[in-house]
Amino acid sequence: MSFDLSSLTDSLNTEFPGAVKTIIEYRGETTLVVLKEKVSEICRSLKDDFGFTFLADLTAVDYLEVKTPRYEVVYHVHRFGPEFDENIRIRLKAEVEGKEPTIDSVTPVWSGADWLEREVYDMFGIEFTGHPDLRRILMPDDYEPFPLRKDFDVRNREASKRSFEKELERGTE
Amino acid sequence: MERVEFISEESVLDTETGARTETMMLNMGPQHPATHGVLRVVLHLDGEVVVKAIPHIGYLHRGIEKLCEHITYQMCLPYTDRMDYLASICNNIGFILSVEKLLGIEDEIPERAKTAEVILFELGRIESHLVGIGTNALDLGAMSAFLYCFKERERIYDILETVCGARLTTSYPRVGGLPLDLPDDFEEKVRNFLRIFPKTLTEVDKLLTRNRIWIERTKGIAFISAEDAIDLGLTGPALRGSGVPYDVRKAMPYLGYENYDFEVPVATDGDAYSRFLCRLEEMNQSLKIIEQALDNLPDGPYAADLPDVVLPKKELTYTKMESLIRHFVLVYEGFKPPAGEVQHAVENPKGELSYYLVSDGSGKPYRMRVRGPSFVNMQALPQMVKGSLVADVIAAIGSLDIVLGEIDR
């Protein structure tokens, strides 16, 4: 099965109308900006029909005050080839609104997305609907702010306080 | 949060004997000698059999990704040391390569710098695999293999010390090449290492590969199939131990790896023993690469001729006003890559390490994301240990060769 980017985008667009919004080529890498609502179906189709069996990375970027929609969830999907020149990696980006950001989980497609999505939730507060176990992963469970958001104030100690610290302070008063 | 309790209320009915059994919850870690850092694994046990394992991470989290948003690209370099601190030189080179890709200057890097980076990268791989095998053996009770491995690791640290002055936190290469030329005795030292190391490798091989106890403790333990390994996103020896020949050096070559003659070792059993065999053979292949690189180490410049990116030479900074100004601007403001985003992957000893950089055209990264191989590999632990004995959890963690600094970043 040879790889042809235009046939991939055409097939995605016929299956899910308007699925691929833009194609960006930069430094030899291909980025597809896709519809947020269809992201899990697109990923399913990429895996089953085009052989992108490996999710290399899943992350998010906060574009506060740079552009709207505010967040971008970024997927790096990889297809193995028998020869090393046939290995293909493309990047998918889905734009997510700022207020109560939610997007479909891709854990049913690649189970490796589990911890990666938990990390994005932990750092950006983006909810993944359909995720089996969406808990904080790096920060403590009772930690309130989302550290990688651009409006996270690094100097604001009060907001970062955890519940037991607040409890301790209340006890000493 | 997982409820901390010693005996859970649910009881399981044994259909054969009619007895009711209860599962016990056991905390392994956060401080446990076999977790190699602060990792807590909550084990639900039915007797000695693991019913469920839930890893809890995040105890070390230092927020490197957030910190890097506030400093220039060049200042991010020392933070990359602190992730996989057993192979910090590999992290350094991976980061430098991703910034070079973002700037679009890969073609201007001199051959000498590239070849030197290949040698250092492979030394880092050997260093990390030695610790991986050594500590895995130590956890399972084989003390001498551990000592043999650590002795050789010191030799690599001696080489790194002559190259960059530091043993553990190297921070060595710079964007555009090397900060200093390689020392005069570099080649001699590496050749000396190439002469001595195969002997130790044979000794470790003899100590473990056909050792009855080692085989019993690792064969068939922590099994993961090839499909599951791909699905979970495993990379490195954890993936190759399951029979998938994916290696970034072959798949998406960087630093001219396509010109070197080496094989990607693959084992098919998918258990802890297979991963050990992969690591052992990878060290042999690394020696092959180092030898080829050393034979072809060219003379010539060690840094690219790019005044906007590379710091001027020290003697020029001290004597020429223009160079001094350029030095100041580069240190204070940094170089400014055009707006855009790249992802660059390298084959770290533990698997695929990739950096995803978003630039907004300023001197600081707008977003830096590190995909640590240990973080993704760690996900496989619950699946690996389900249904095995408590003692096998230690073999499983050891065979994954995790570094908590990289998991938590």
Image (tube, coloured by chain):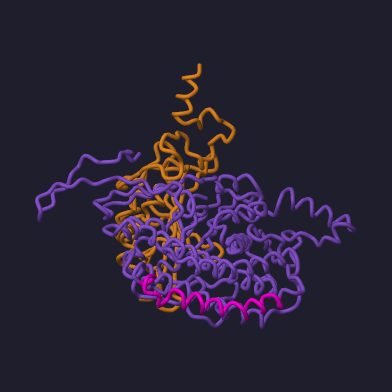
Chain colours: A orange, B purple
Q: Nearer the viewer, residue A91 or B118?
A: B118
Whether the magenta-drawn stretch holds residue B291 is answered as no
Q: Is residue B6 above or below residue A111?
A: above
The location of residue B234, given as percent across then percent down, is 40, 63
Q: Is residue A49 left or right of residue B86?
A: left
Q: Chief secondary structure of the magenta span?
A: helix
Residue range of the region highlighted in magenta in the rendering: B187-215
Residue B199 in view: yes
Whether the magenta-drawn stretch holds residue B198 is answered as yes
Q: Nearer the viewer, residue A122 or B38?
A: B38
Q: Nearer the viewer, residue A66 or B51?
A: B51
Quadrant of the rendered image containing residue B83: bottom right
Q: Is residue B338 left or right of residue A92?
A: right
Residue A69 in view: no
The location of residue B193, given as percent across then percent down, is 64, 76
Residue at left offset 66%, top offset 79%: B294
Farthest right residue in view: B319
Quadrant of the rendered image containing residue B227: bottom left
Q: Nearer the viewer, residue B114 or A5?
A: B114
Which quarter of the rendered picture does the N terminus of chain B lie within? top left
